[in-house]
Amino acid sequence: MAVIRLRGAILLALVFFIAVPGALFAAAQPAASVTPAAQAAAIEAEAAPANAGAVHIEQALVTLPAIRVYLHPDQAPGAGQIVGDIRAELGRQALTVEGLTAFDAEREGMLYIFLVDVSGSLRTAQTAAIKAALKSFSRELTPADRLALIAFGENTDILLYGGESQAAVDEAVDALHNRDQNTLFYNGIWQALDLAGQERGYPERRAAIVISDGVDDTPGGFYTKEETVKRLAAGGLPFYGLGLQRRDGRGNLLNKDELDAFGEIIRVSQGAAGQVFDAGGDSDNLSLKLAELRDYTRAARVLALRAKSNFAAGGTETLRLSLGAAPLLTLSVPVEPANSLPDRAAPYVTGVGRLPAPAIGVRVSFSEALMAGGATGGGELAGDILPYVAVTDAEGR
C-alpha cells in the first residue's frame, strides 16, 4: 500500500466558536495550506493535548476507481504534532494513496447551498442581517464557485440554482422575508440533498449552510425527523449550521430547545462537518461568521486515493483512514455504479487453473474485477470445465 509521510507543525489562527450542546468551544481557523510534492506531504494541525494530531473528514467523493477525501486539521485549542503514515481502505479493499494537496478554490471551486429560514420567529433585523451577509458572501466567491439558495418556511422554494448573475443573486436575496408561520426544516434538508445530487455544471465539491433560529418540528411536512436523520447519515453532503438566538429584554435565551434540536440534526451530517456556529443574538457578526466558514472550507486538504478497479456494488461502504498514531477515521460513503468512471480497456486472463479436489472445474483469473454471470466482482470466475474461455470487451473485441 502506498504511504504518505505526515509532518505536523503548530498553527496560529483566527478564533471563532463552534456551538455544541451544553458548551462553547473555541476553534482555531487553519492557516495557509501547504502544497506537497508527489507522494509526500505535510498536514499542519493545532490540536488539544488530549487528542493531539487529530484530523477529521469533511467529505469523501467516490467515483471509482478515484476517491477524493477532504480533510481538516483538528480545531480544538492547544498544541500538538502528527507524524505518521496514511493508510486507507474502502470496505475490505486497500486503497493506494496518490497524493495530498491543498484545496484550490480558484481552480476547483465549490457549490454552496444556502438554506435560509423565513419563518416569522426571526426578527426583522435578523433577516436584514442574513440578506447583507449573503450578498457579501456572494461577492467574495471565486469564478469557479456556485451559490444556490433555498428558502424554507411554510414551503421550500429554490430561489437560486447556482451560476446566476450577481444582479439575480441580489434580487433573490432581497425577496427573503420573515413572514411564514411554520418552519418546514426537514423539507428544506431534503431539497438541498436533492439539488446537490443534480448535475448542472456544479463543482465536484458541495456543501450546505443552514441559517435558522432552530427546529420546531412543524407538522405537515413531507418528511419526518427519523427519515431526515437516516438520509443525512447515509452521507454525500456535509452540512454547516448558523444558529440565530432569540432573547428577551433580560437577556434570557428563548429558543434554546429549538437551537439544540437544530444542532442535533446538523451534527448527523457527514463527518465532522455537522457543526453549528453561534451567530449571536443580534446577528451583527453574521457576515464575519460566513466569511470564517468560507475560509474554513477553503483550508481543506485533499487526499487522492485510488481503488484497484471501478467495480461498485451499490449502497454504502465504510471508508477507513489511518493517520499514524492518530485515531482511526471512518466515514460511511455512497458507492454507486452510476458514479464509477467507465472502463475502456478490455480485461485479460492472468491465470487458469483447476479447482482443488474434489471439485471438478476451472478457475480463471482476470486483470480486473468483472461483472458478469458467475463473476465474484473480484476478478475471478469459477465453474465447470469448458472447451475454451473467451473474454471480450463491450465492443466485442
Image (spheres, helix red, strand yellow):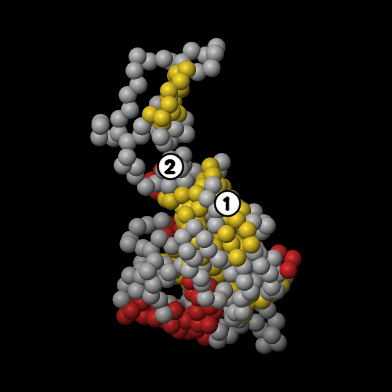
Specify the farthest residue to the right.
50
Looking at the image, residue 363 lies above or below residue 111: above
Number of on-image labels:
2
At x 51%, y 72%, the residue is 33
Q: Secondary structure at mark 1?
A: strand
| Residue behind mark 1 | 87
Crowding around mark 1 (Cα neighbors within 10 Å: few <14, some 14 to 19, many 20+) is many
Looking at the image, residue 235 lies above or below residue 390: below
Looking at the image, residue 297 lies above or below residue 70: below
Badge 2 amino acid: Ser
Q: Nearer the viewer, mark 2 or mark 1?
A: 1
In percent of width and height, residue 185 lies at 52, 64
In percent of width and height, residue 330 lies at 60, 52
| Residue behind mark 2 | 309
Q: Secondary structure at mark 2?
A: loop
At x 39%, y 72%, the residue is 106
At x 32%, y 72%, the residue is 164
Crowding around mark 2 (Cα neighbors within 10 Å: few <14, some 14 to 19, many 20+) is some
Please state if 158 lies on the left or on the right of 262 as rendered: left
Residue 74 occupies which quadrant of the picture? bottom right
Q: Which mark is residue 4?
A: none
